[in-house]
Image: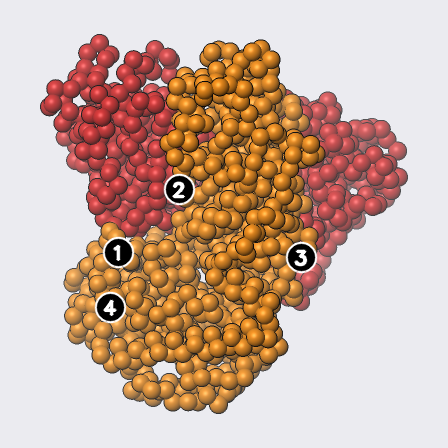
Chain colours: A orange, B red
Amino acid sequence: MAASSSLTVSQALIGRTTGSHSGSTSKSDRLALPGFGLRTLAGRGIKSQSLRVAGSRKRVGTRSTTRAAAVETLDKTETELIEKSINTIRFLAIDAVEKANSGHPGLPMGCAPMGHILYDEVMKYNPKNYTWFNRDRFVLSAGHGCMLQYALLHLAGFDSVKEEDLKAFRQWGSKTPGHPENFETVGIEVTTGPLGQGIANAVGLALSEKHLAARYNKPDSEIVDHYTYCILGDGCQMEGISNEACSLAGHWGLGKLIAFYDDNHISIDGDTEIAFTESVDTRFEGLGWHVIWVKNGNTGYDEIRAAIKEAKAVKDKPTLIKVTTTIGYGSPNKANSYSVHGSALGAKEVDATRKNLGWPHEPFHVPEDVKKHWSRHVPEGAALEAEWNAKFAEYEKKYKEEAAELKSIITGELPAGWEKALPTYTPESPADATRNLSQQCLNALAKVLPGLIGGSADLASSNMTLMKMFGDFQKNTPEERNVRFGVREHGMGAICNGIALHSPGLIPYCATFFVFTDYMRAAIRISALSEARVIYVMTHDSIGLGEDGPTHQPIEHLASFRAMPNILMLRPADGNETAGAYKVAVSSRKRPSILALSRQKLPNLPGTSIEGVEKGGYTISDNSSGNKPDVILIGTGSELEIAAKAADELRKEGKAVRVVSFVSWELFDEQSDEYKESVLPSAVSARVSIEAGTTFGWEKIVGSKGKAIGIDRFGASAPAGKIYKEFGITAEAIIAAAKAIF
Amino acid sequence: MAASSSLTVSQALIGRTTGSHSGSTSKSDRLALPGFGLRTLAGRGIKSQSLRVAGSRKRVGTRSTTRAAAVETLDKTETELIEKSINTIRFLAIDAVEKANSGHPGLPMGCAPMGHILYDEVMKYNPKNYTWFNRDRFVLSAGHGCMLQYALLHLAGFDSVKEEDLKAFRQWGSKTPGHPENFETVGIEVTTGPLGQGIANAVGLALSEKHLAARYNKPDSEIVDHYTYCILGDGCQMEGISNEACSLAGHWGLGKLIAFYDDNHISIDGDTEIAFTESVDTRFEGLGWHVIWVKNGNTGYDEIRAAIKEAKAVKDKPTLIKVTTTIGYGSPNKANSYSVHGSALGAKEVDATRKNLGWPHEPFHVPEDVKKHWSRHVPEGAALEAEWNAKFAEYEKKYKEEAAELKSIITGELPAGWEKALPTYTPESPADATRNLSQQCLNALAKVLPGLIGGSADLASSNMTLMKMFGDFQKNTPEERNVRFGVREHGMGAICNGIALHSPGLIPYCATFFVFTDYMRAAIRISALSEARVIYVMTHDSIGLGEDGPTHQPIEHLASFRAMPNILMLRPADGNETAGAYKVAVSSRKRPSILALSRQKLPNLPGTSIEGVEKGGYTISDNSSGNKPDVILIGTGSELEIAAKAADELRKEGKAVRVVSFVSWELFDEQSDEYKESVLPSAVSARVSIEAGTTFGWEKIVGSKGKAIGIDRFGASAPAGKIYKEFGITAEAIIAAAKAIF
C-alpha cells in the first residue's frame, strides 16, 4: 500500500500515522509535540535480537533482516511523566476495584505500560466521537481487566467514563460494568469477558478493515486504513476459539492485526505451569504469525514501542507481541500471584502499593501534569477526524458510487427498497429445500446489500451459502465476499461478531449444520448480548437430514435458542417464509437471527408470506368462522407441510381447522394481544403442535389441554422418511391427537 | 517403565507387545507367525530423515538420533496379501456406502493402510470380548469415515459387524450407524462425528491409562498397559477443541497416545488451501508433541510401521504421525477431490475403481486368504486376555487391596454403602454456598469412590473442586486425582467423556462457571448421547454471582439443558440437596449430570432431603390438608429459600401453602402419576414458580393459570442482592403473584 501524502501534527506520534502503516520515516515524525515532546527516530535499523522464549530452548524467529524502526530513548523528564501516567492507570484500577470490593486489579497493573503506549502514543481515535469510522480498533480480550480500558478511556477524554463512572465501577446502572460491554460504554468495541472471544472479534475487525480497504481504497486515497489492537492473556490463549481465529488470521495475512499477549504466567488456579506449558510462540509461528517477544513489559517502554514498529512493518502477517509482565505489578506482597488476579487488594496492600510505587495521591486522583498531557487527545482526535472527513469529501468527488456505498456501510442505512430484491413464491413453484431457498435469498440480497459478507464452516456446498457473483475473501483477494471459515464454528461466530460491530452496515452471515451451533454457542450468546446483527444460516435442522444420525440431528436446539434473550430463532417452512426470515434478519439492526433450514425438499404452501413471518406466527389456512376453529394445528419449518396435510384430512371429515405457522416465537410474543388472540384464540384449547424437535416449551403454545408432537429423545441413523415415521412425526399422529382432544 | 518379562506368540507382531512399549528388540519379534509370517527387525537403526512439511519451509524436528526401530521390507507374497486386505477394507467401505447411497467413502479408501496396520499388526484386543480392560483403545476422530472401522471390526471377527450389518449401513436399527456410536456398536470406544471430539476423547482415554498405570502397576507387574490410537483429519485439526486437548496431552506427556493425522488436503469445501494453511507440524511441536511425517500413506506400509515404532519409543510425549494420503485412493476420477468425501461413488465410478485396483469381486466380498489371515485375531485376542487374566490373578495374590480397587474400576461396581459417606445437614447447619457444599461432597466421595477423578477449567478455587486428600494429576504425578484443565472447557468435557468411557468405574467430574457450559456444550451433548457418566460441577449459576455481569450470568442455561435428552439437570438448594444431587449423579451409570451451584450462601432449609432429590420434585413444607393447598410455590436452587420465605408470609395471612423443591425436572418426570399428583395436584392451578433464569418451559409446571417468576433478559453488573431486587426475584413478587391468582 502506498504511503499517505501528508501528515498532520497529531499523526506524528510514533506509528500514529493516518495514511501510512509503512515503517518509513517522515519529516513530521521528528516534530516536537506540545505538552509531551515524544520524539521518534524511525528507520534507525536496530539488528533484530535472537528472541528466546522463556521456559523453552526454542528459537523464535531467526530473522536476519534489520528491524524496520526503533525509538530513541526518551529523556528523564519524559520518562518520569510516562511512569506517572502509567501509575495513574494502575491506581485508577486499584482504587475502583477497592471501592467496588470486586474486580480484577492484576491485569491493569501489569498491562498499564502497553495500555498507555497504545492509547497515548499509537492509536488514532476521536474521544468525542468514538464512532468515527477510520479509528483504530482496540479489543481487551482479557475482559476481566476492564479497569485498564476504563482508566484509559477516562484519561483520553471519553465522556462515557468520567470520575463518577470510575467510582461506580461494577454498580447497578453504571457505565463501567464488570466486563467491557459495547452496549453500555461508548469507546468499547465489542463485549468481552468470556475468554478467547475478544481475540476472535479482533480478527473480525481486522478482516473488515482489510476487506473494506481492498474494496474502497484508491491509488490516490487510502480512505480505509486502521489497525486493530488486542490484548489477550493466558486464558484467551488456552481457549480453542483463539486458536481457530488466529489460524484464520494467519491464513488471511491480516497484517494490520497486532495482538499483545500478556504473558504473566499466572492464571486463577496459580502458575500457568500447572496446565499451560506449550510454546505459544512456536504455535503462532505455525499459525503463520509474526512473533515478537518483549521481555520486560513492566518498564521496557522502548521495547514495547519497538515491537509495535516492527509489527507494523510486517504487512503480510498478523503479529503477536508476547509481552512478559508481572501481574499486579507494584503490589509488594501480591504481585506475581493469583491473589491479585480477581480480588481487591485490600486497604493494607493498597497502602503498601502506594508506598512502593511512590504514589501519595488520594484515590481516583489524576495528577495535573498527567491530565494536561492526555488533554491533547480531544483536539487531536477531532483533527484526525476532520482530516479524514476532508479526505472523504475529496474521495466522494472522484468516486461517487464507491463513496455512496461506503457511506451506507459506515452509517448502516440500507438502500431504499432493498427488500424488494427478495424472491417470492407461489404454491406452483417447485418444491425445494429451505437451504436452497436461502441461497436464492442470499444471492438476491448480495446484489443490493453492499455490506453482506459471509460464509460457512467448510460446508458451503451443504449450507448453500455461496454468493455466486463474488469470489473468495482470501489473503490476495480481500475485496471478495465469500468467507471460507474452515471447520471452525466457534471462531466463525466470534469473527462475525467483530465484523458486525466494525461498521453498522456490515451484515455478516455464517453457516454450519444446526446441531453444531453447540460448538459456537458462546459466540452466538455474545451476538445476542452485544446486539450484533449476525445472521446464522443453520441448515440440516432436524432428523430430516437422515443417515448422519443422532450426532448430527438437532433435537433441543430450537428450544435452547428460544430460551436465549435478544435473538430471533426463525424456522421458515418454504420459499416465502425463507424470504421473510431474511427480511426480518436484515431489518433487525440490534439483534442476531438464527435461520433453521431444511436439508430436504419442502413444497411451497398456500398462505405463507413474508408479512406473516414478520409477525412470528400467523394463520396460513382456515375453514372456520368467527375465530372458533374446532382445532388449531401449529407447525414450524418442515413440519408445517405435515400440519397442512393433516388439516386437509380433518376438513374432509367436516372439521373446522386452522393451520398456524409459528416461524418465530419471539416475533409472535412482540405482537399485540389482539393479534395474538386472532391467531390463537384463548377460547380454543384444542391445539396440536408438531415440530421435529423437543416438545420442551410447547406447553406455552398448546396449553395444558393441547398436545405437542415432537421428539424428546436423540435421533437415529436412517433415511429421513423412515425416521419421521418411526418417531411419529406424521399427519396421522396429528389427526389422532386432534381427535383425542375434540 | 520396565519391559515385560515374557512375550507370547500373539504379541510378537510389530509393536504388539503386552508389557513393553520400549523399542528394544526381542527374540519373539522374529517369530514366524501362522498364516501371515510378518517379520520385524527391531533396532536396525535407520537414520532419521530431515522431515519437511509440505507447503512450508520449516524443518520439523531436527532429531539427530537414530530411529528406534524399523521394519524389514516384506517379501512380495506378503505385500500382496496386505494390499489385498487393504483393498478389502476399501471395497467394503465403497460397497456399503454405495448400497446405502449415503456415507463417506473417501476417508476409508485413503486410510485403509493405516487402519489395516493398526488392527492387524499393532493393536491388542479380543474380538469376542471387546470390553477386556487392557485392550488398546482406538478412536476414529474423523467419525464420518466410520466404514473404515466397521470394515476393520468385521475383518477382525467382532460379532457386532457381520456381513448383514455392513449391508445395513446407515439403516434404521442397524449396528452400523452413520457415525461411530459406542452405544450401538460393540467395538466402538466413543461416539464421534462432531469434529475434534474424538481426539479429545482419546486424550481422556490416554490420561486414564496413565493414571491407572501409575496407581496400580507394580515393579513386577504392569497390569495396566495399553496404547490409545486415534485417526483425525483436517477437520478435527481445525477445531479449537483439538488444540485444547492436544495442548493438555503435551503438557501431561501422554507418551502412549499416538495420533494419525490423515493429511489429505481435502475438506468438504475443496482443497484445504482455501482455509487451512497453517503448519500443523509446527503447532504440534509447540504443543509439546513428537511429530513424524509419513509422506506416502497410500502405499508406504513400512513408513507407517516405522513411524509407529518411533512413536512408541518416545515415552514422554504424545506423537502425531502426519500421514499424507489421497482421499478416495483408487478411484480414478474422484480421488483427491471433495466429491469423494461424503457421497457414494456411483455405480460407474465403483466399476472404474474396481478395475483400477484390480478388484474383480462382488460387493461385500472378503477373499478367502484375507479372511484366513484375519482369522487369527479371535484366538490371539482370547490368548491375550487369558494371559492378562492370569497376570491379574497373580497380581491379586500379591496386591489384594489394589486388585480389589482396580477391579471395581474395571467393573464399575460401586463399594457397598458408598452413599453413606455423603454429608447431611440440618436447618441449624451454617448457611453456605452450594459450591462449598459440593466440595464437601466431593471430598467425602473421594474417600470411598476409587474412580473419582476430575477438576476445573482454571477455576478450582471458585468452583471448589479440589479433593484435598490428593495432589495434582501431572506428567510426573499421574497417580494423583485433581486434574488441572486450564481454561479449556470444551477440551475438558470431551476428555471427561474419554475418561468415563475408558472404564465403567471411572467417574470424572469437571467444572467451570455455569454460563461457560456454552463453551463445552457439544461435549456435554456427546456425554448425554454416548451415556457417559460425567458429573458437570457448574457453579455461579445465576445473577447471584453479581458484579461480573451479563457475560457471566446464565439465564437460558437451565432450560437449554432441561431440553436436552438423557442428561440430568440438577439445581440443589442447600446441603442435603447437594448431597442428593451427588447421590443421583454417581448412581446414574448411563447418563451425565449437571449440578448448578450457587456462588452465594444459602440457608439449610427444613424439609430438604437426599430422598427428595431422588424424586426430582417434592414438598418441603405444607400447611394444607387433603392435598388441596391454596397455592403451590415452586422453587429451585437459590430461589427455594425465597419461596419458603414467601410461604411463611402467606401462611401468616392464613393461607394454606405448599412449597415444592423442583431440583430436577427429568427425575420428576420419571415418577409415577400418583406421586406427581401428590406433589402437584391437578386440581390446584394456583401455582407460582420462582427461578433466577428464563421462564421458558415453566408453563408446563405452573400451567396456564399459574405464574412463572424468572428473568427473560440478560443480567447486569452489580452486587447480587441489588440485581435480585431490581429483577423482581423476591418474596414480595411471589406474594403478589400468589394473591393475583387466589
Q: Is circle 1 on the same chain as circle 2?
A: yes
* Amino acid type assigned to the residue bearing label 1 in the image: Ser
- The tag on residue A174 is 1
Height in image: A88 above or below B738? below
Q: Position of residue A209 (x, y in %)?
A: 53, 66
Which sits earlier in the primary sequence, circle 3 or circle 1? 1
Residues under labels 3 and 2: Cα distance? 34 Å
Say if mark 4 contacts mark 2, CB within 8 Å: no
Instruction: Identify residue for label 4.
Output: A91
Element marked by disc 2: loop
- Give the residue number, with chain letter if any, for mark 2: A565
Residue annotated with mark 3: A470
Q: In which quarter of the view is residue A637 placed?
A: top right
Q: Chain of mark 4?
A: A
User: Residue at (43%, 37%) from the top-left corner?
Assistant: A666
Give the CA separation, mark 3 to mark 1. Answer: 45 Å
Q: Chain of mark 1?
A: A
